[in-house]
Image (spheres, grey):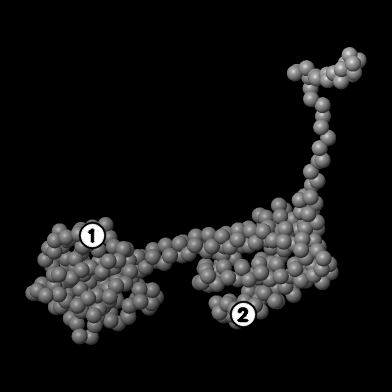
Amino acid sequence: MHHALRSRTVFRPAADAPAAPVDRPRPQPVRSLIDADALRVLHRAARVLLEDLAGLTDRLVAVLQEQEPAYRAAVTCDPTATWQEVHRSLRHSVSSLLDPRGSRDAARRCSWRIGATRAEQGLPLDALLHAFRLGGSLVWQGLIDETARTAPEDVRLLVHVASDVWNFVDEHCTLVADAYRQVERQLAWRRENRLRVLAGALLDGASRIADLPETAQALDLPEEGRYVVVAVTAGCPTDGAGARAALARGARVYWHTGVEVDYGIVLLGEDADAGTVGRPGQERPPTAGPGHGTVPGPGPGPGTGSSGAGPAVGSARTGVSTAVTGLAAVGDARRL
């Protein structure tokens, strides 16, 4: 009995003794194996697309002509330039599938140039982004079709790289939009500055006769129209409604802002004369900086005469010239 009890004595390790290793099954790198197989399938199909890049370009240009009116006009205007642009973009896109790190910078530069160039040409941004998404769809469909043709059992693996393909498309759409908007802002600033220079030369009487047709076209004013010039104290609020000026009924006005005085080059209608300009109670069109506005009709109240300084309306003083004929005489009207 004593021997039996001793034989059943359990020996426990000390508390500080290391635990015996436990054999547990190690996780298999299933995911990494799937990713490797998916990349192999992706690269195999991408190399085929790269070898037939001209055919892929032809297909995308045809899709753009069919689905995007803005590109239809671009292809008609300059088919070679459009084809080459599409070809470059596709080459960088497919190359990025094969070598993302090595091709990234060149692909980004290509997309940026396309966005900037198309902004300069005036192609709508929506059309440009649509073109990039169509290109991404065509590349993705090409990868699927090529894999289905050579190894149908591998098509399922492409789902593991789909996010990489579409993340690339989204990244480049963002890049194109950023380039487009940056150039668009630069162009708008240049246009505004050019208009200010042309209008300033008119008001100063410094425009050359040879430049008048260009000035008329830029300001969208007839070279031989009838004009008055309205001067308004710059930046003076009146009753919280902005500076008031008296303007001609049914006319158009081009506002040239200054440091102390703003000038409106007012095109008179056939039924308007300088005597109708200068009546108080008319709001100045709410334009910030140079620009055109439709001038409302004269408000109630007596006229202020056909020339000279007008009345003080609130804290702003106004002046109105006599009528002159032709843009060449705007400088004389401004001096009046």
**Please, what secondary structure does the residue beneath circle 2 have?**
helix
Q: Identify the residue at image location x=13%, y=70%.
A: 280
Residue type at mark 2 is Gln
Q: CA distance from mark 1 to mark 2?
A: 51 Å
Counting labels gives: 2
Mark 1 or mark 2, which has the lower sequence index?
2
Mark 2 lies on residue: 65
Q: What crowding class fits label 1: few (fewer than 14 Cα within 10 Å), some (14-19), or many (20 or more)?
A: some
Residue type at mark 1 is Ala
Q: Identify the residue at image location x=53%, y=70%.
A: 126
Q: What crowding class fits label 2: few (fewer than 14 Cα within 10 Å), some (14-19), or many (20 or more)?
A: some
Question: x%, y% of residue 23?
Answer: 83, 35
Numbered label attached to residue 171: none
Mark 1 lies on residue: 234
Q: Quadrant of the N terminus?
A: top right
Q: Quadrant of the C terminus?
A: bottom left
Q: Are marks 1 and 2 in contact (CB under 8 Å)?
A: no
Residue nearer the viewer, 187 or 86: 86
